[in-house]
Amino acid sequence: MERFEIRVSDDVLDDLRERLARTRFPDQLEGAGWSYGTELGYLRELVAYWRDEYDWRVHERALNRFDHYKTRVRDLDIHFIHQRSPEPNALPLLVTHGWPGSVYEFHKILGPLTDPVSHGGRREDAFHVVCPSMPGYGFSQAPRASGFDVREIAETGAALMSQLGYTRYGAQGGDWGSSVTVQLALLHPERLAGIHLNMVVAGPPREVTNPLEGLAPEEIAWVAAMRQMQSEETGYQRIQGTRPQTLGYALNDSPAGLAAWIVEKFRAWSDCGGDVESRFGKDDLLTNVMLYWVPQSITSSMRLYCETMRCGRFAPPEQRVQVPVGAAIFPAEIYKAPRAWAEAVYDIRRWTVMRSGGHFAALEEPEALVTDLREFFRPLRAG
């Protein structure tokens, strides 16, 4: 296990600026806005900012204030942040990101989770936080063989926690991090105090003939929104789940193309009302994109869709999750299962419907997420 520092060479940054300066922008239909994908005017603005004003070194230094490591886990070199609390009785917490996110998503919550006293909280709510870059993401090595799906990532997370000496801990995740966390609970329930999810995946109970029966009007609206999302917003899943390599050639070669592919999801999946920068500044968006551009991890990250679909785990869990589950439901989340559906497969101990926020909870609503984590795990720490 070795200390790791993010150090991007000047050559990489010079090459990036040259590529941005040579961007060939496509045309766009008049009045199309974002209805066909990333809007041309906004991407031109973002690319110009990236080329002329964005300072990677500022964000590199900020990221390096956290404690980064690399270690060999299950024959892969895994990068992770291991931010220990000053409180000796802190509960270890494994936090897993998703796509198109990264460990950068967690920079606002690491301080409050590890040092609650300095952030208006109670010392007994402290966590030792472990945030791995999933295999094939960021600075973690990509798997070399097929079949490395969310279950394999869960096993990798479990092995990492064992190497760190943690025998009992909590886990948290959204997006792919939710699927990984659920798999971890199915594989190693004896190690977990509980799991907390900010995207809860569940379908109608098998014994129910009318899936809408007994649901509140708000939950019926959730189901309608999920169906619309499946109809209109999942083209990326089909591409990444079938031919990620083909798409990868373009996104790995063009920084403008990579930004367009990723930023469109931050706009569509967040509680931004159509204005992506009402939730994320350009620097937030681009620093996350940089964690795909610099290590050239976009293609391997997309392969997770293909591997998980081929392994048949791109769906709600078939087994009941026996460990305690906390659910934070943010209004703009892309997948919001009704509570009755979730309770059919999860041991729900806390169910919080948030007032605002979306898919990228740790970036959008860090205080709400931290509060919910503290309150969910509070009765589960002893055990």
Image (cartoon, rainbow, N blue to C red):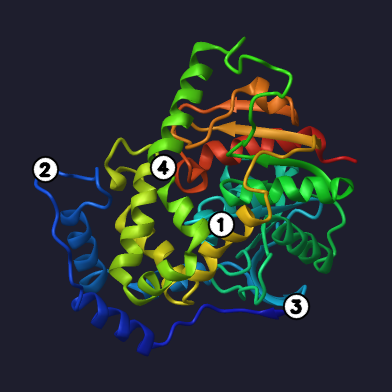
Marks 1/3: CA–CA distance: 21 Å
Marks 4/3: CA–CA distance: 34 Å
> Residues at badges 1 and 3 in contact (C-beta under 8 Å)?
no
Residue 142: image location, x then y, percent: 61, 74
Q: Circle 4: is it few (<14), some (14-19), or many (20+) Cα within 10 Å? A: many
| Residue 16 in which image quadrant | bottom left
Foreground label between 2 and 3: 2
Q: Earlier in the sequence, mark 2 or mark 1?
A: 2
The reply to whether residue 271 is in sight is: yes
Residue 290: image location, x then y, percent: 41, 69
Marks 2/1: CA–CA distance: 33 Å
Marks 2/3: CA–CA distance: 51 Å
Name the disc covering residue 75, or none: 3
Q: Seen from this angle, which residue lies furthest left?
A: 30
Instruction: Name the residue: 30% across, 43% down.
Output: 278
The reply to whether residue 331 is in sight is: no
Instruction: Name the residue: 58% across, 39% down.
Output: 199
Q: Earlier in the sequence, mark 1 or mark 3?
A: 3
Give, as a three-letter code, the residue at label 4. Trp
Name the disc covering residue 269, or none: 4
